[in-house]
Amino acid sequence: MTSEPAAVDGRAARWSGQHERRRAQFVEAALDAIAEHGPDVSTDQIAQRAGVARTRLYKHFAGAADLNRSIAARAVELVTAELEPVWNPQGSPMEMISTAVSTHLRWLTEHGNLYRYLTKRSLSGSADGPDAVTDVKSSIAQHLSALFDTYFELLGIEGVPAEPLGYGLVGYVDAAATRWLERPGDVTLDEMIDQLTRAIWAVLDEILERHGIALDPSDPLPL
């Protein structure tokens, strides 16, 4: 009598694990389908990429909204991992800024369709899942704000709110980068990185100058 619940629990655990693995596999297939077909990818195209019928796909998701939520959550994980250099900045001010900007822009160019997919669902105002684009931008802005707070304290700068500065710079970069992604014109990736890097440094340099601090942007900052 005592062995039956354990057997049932064991089967439930195995099913749960298999269910989660299949969901993860389908999400990865969805990412591949988005990369191939663009932001207007259909559920049929995702199912085809996964090698299953659409009805079988939905056995693992509670409809399109659940699938979109899972795709968005996975996208946040991928972007967060890709932006590791931003979370642990090193070197001079220019190197730090350039690394952050180039990491963001290179991710956009390599995953343009995924970014458009997430942005489209964000702008649609649907409740299909977490706003991955906003989540990523907020995460970067919060890290930058904490970094600014640290260096402002180190340099003896008071009265400069770090959070609005962090969010403002992230918004500027994101807006400029998104526009460039859609209409690059004659501007190359390296030129865009250089332009944004110099613009961000100009903002920070003005703050430093107002507080009587002169920093060479090519000299390493203390950690």
Image: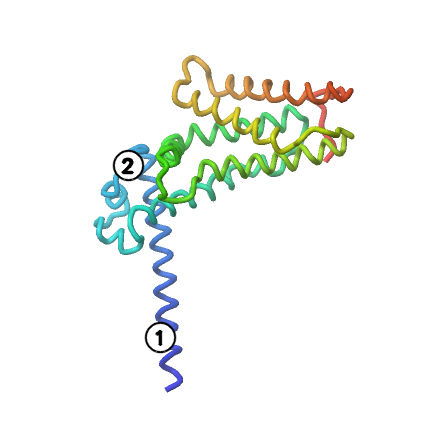
Quarter holding residue 149: top right
Q: Is residue 182 above or below residue 114?
A: above
Q: For numbered disc 1, what is the local secondary structure?
A: helix
The 10 Å Cα crowd at callout 1, few under 14, some 14 to 19, many 20 or more, is few
Q: Which residue is mark 1?
A: 8
The percent coordinates of residue 24 (x first, y second) are 37, 51
Q: Is residue 171 left or right of residue 179?
A: right
Q: Is residue 140 left or right of residue 183?
A: right
Looking at the image, is 179 positioned above or below residue 33? above
**Front in this rendered view, residue 174 or 222:** 174
Q: Quadrant of the N terminus?
A: bottom left
* Disc number for residue 104: none
Q: Amino acid at mark 2?
A: Val
Distance from the alpha carbon under mark 1 to that under mark 2? 39 Å
Q: Which residue is mark 2?
A: 41
What residue appears at the point 43 percent right and 12 percent down from the top-left corner? Answer: 186
